[in-house]
Image: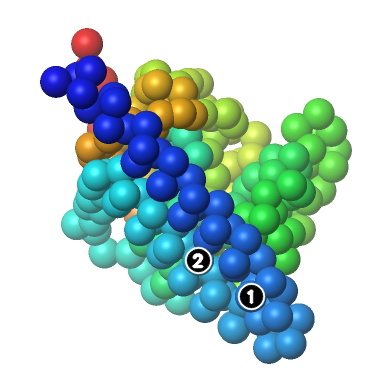
Amino acid sequence: MKFLKKIIAYPLSIIYYLFFGSTLLIFQPIQWIANNIFGYKAHKKVVDVFNGCLVSCLYILGTRITFINKQSIPDGVPLIIVSNHQGLYDISPLSWFFRKYHPKFVSKKELGKGLPSISYNLRHGGSVLIDRKNPKQAISALINFGKYLENSKYSAIIFPEGTRSRTGIPKKFSSNGLKTLVKFIPSAYIVPVTINNSYKLLENGTFPLALGTHLTFEVHKPIEVKSNSFENLFKKTEQTIKNAVILYA
């Protein structure tokens, strides 16, 4: 059965990549037009549709996506959405499900070029690109990003692990980026999110992609930034996220 499933995965992966690639190419000029002619609001709507299309592409692979949110997320304040990171397929579902809150990513600078639609949105949609080899640039960029979110009441999405976990086992969280954001977005709430199973889409590598994967995104109780010291906020956030990661033998 497993062998047959992998055989079927080959043609479905080809179809998936055709739709995925076409989506990236189609939305690049649409984003440019929306952003340069109509401004932020139009660009934001286009990006929302773009991310919805990327999520829909995953259904070609029989992927199921469950977004679990039993929490009351505050409106009218900036959010710092903190999540574990299991792969590329974390990003579009997070963007889609949190679209109401204008999510912006803390991303490495390398993603700011070379990827149609994705790179354009990272450069022009309000996200921040940091050079992990240049701490001075990274801190300065995060400070400006934090001030922007505090003023606009938009939201940040940050993966404190820095790089994705290929096994689902969470890596050690780095406090540096989150500490800067907390300092310069004092009215924010931290929203911890636990992602499970997205790494399984790549269990065979990038080709073929795995079929029938069930991705889950679990939202935990928001934590008011000014309610506690950063050390306690960071510890609570990391423990909350990691405690909900499901590991398989």
Residue at the image point whose x is 66% and y is 66% from the top? 28
Task: Kindly identify which numbered label has been placed on residue 103.
Answer: none
Residue at the image point whose x is 23% and y is 37% from the top? 212
Mark 2 element type: helix
Per the image, the residue denoted by label 1 is 30
Left or right: residue 122 versus residue 72 is right
Mark 1 element type: helix
In the depicted view, which residue is nearer to us: 32 or 23? 23
Residue type at tag 2: Phe
How far apart marks 2 and 1 lie (CA) works out to 10 Å
Left or right: residue 30 versus residue 172 is right
Residue at the image point whose x is 68% and y is 49% from the top? 115
Do the residues bearing badges 2 and 1 touch, measured as CB atoms within 8 Å?
Answer: yes
Q: Is residue 145 above or below residue 138?
A: below
Residue 207 rendering spot, x and y as whole percentages: 46, 28
Mark 2 closeness class: few <14, some 14–19, many ≥20 residues within 10 Å: many
Per the image, the residue denoted by label 2 is 50
Residue at the image point whose x is 50% and y is 21% from the top? 172
Residue extending farthest left: 1
Residue 179 rendering spot, x and y as whole percentages: 61, 41
Q: Is residue 3 above or below residue 61?
A: above
Q: Earlier in the sequence, mark 2 or mark 1?
A: 1
In the depicted view, which residue is nearer to us: 118 or 13? 13
- Which of the 4 image quarters holds residue 37? bottom right
- Can I make out residue 3 in this image? yes
